[in-house]
Amino acid sequence: MAAEPQISKIERLIERSDASRLFLTEHVQTLRYRADIPARVRGLFNSHPSLWFGGSLLLGWLFTAMLRRRKPTPKPQSARRKGVLGFALATVTSLAKPALKSMLIAEFRKRMLSPVDKKNATASPRQFTL
């Protein structure tokens, strides 16, 4: 009779190990499914393609609406000069710009260049031969 309880004890251990093996196998399969994110995403795309397409269109529209530049507000007309006097001042300043620019550049060169630099600035560049 001592052999009988020993055999039933071994059979219970075998059944218990089979049950735990089956339990672990199911959990490993579940873990593999949850860890395989690309396959899950592909499954979602394949199951509801129109929903994903519509969502991407809506999201793109929202992003472009948020990042869109606003049109500048126009300045009021009172800020601009009107009439003959405004036209005359605009014409005189536009004609005087090149002359003022050349005068400023000449004055800058006169004040910033030393006498040695003036000689080198007017001399022709040397020709180097090899």
Image (cartoon, rainbow, N blue to C red):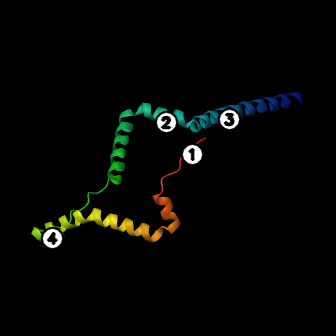
Q: Position of residue 129 (x, y in %)?
A: 58, 42
Tag 3 residue:
24
Residue at horizontal 88%, vertical 28%? 3
Name the residue type under label 2. Val
Of label 2 and label 3, which has the lower sequence position? 3
Circles 4 and 3: CB atoms closer than 8 Å = no
Tag 1 residue:
128
Circles 2 and 1: CB atoms closer than 8 Å = no
Q: Real-space Cα distance between discs 2 and 3?
A: 25 Å
Q: Mark 2, mark 1: which one is toward the viewer?
A: 1
Which of the pair 65/49 is nearer the observer? Answer: 65
CA neighbours of label 4 inside 10 A, class few (<14), some (14 to 19), many (20+) = few
Residue at horizontal 48%, vertical 64%? 118
CA neighbours of label 1 inside 10 A, class few (<14), some (14 to 19), many (20+) = few
Secondary structure of the residue carrying numbered label 4:
helix
Name the residue type under label 1. Phe
Q: Which mark is residue 41?
A: 2
Residue at horizontal 78%, vertical 33%? 13
Of label 1 and label 4, which has the lower sequence position? 4
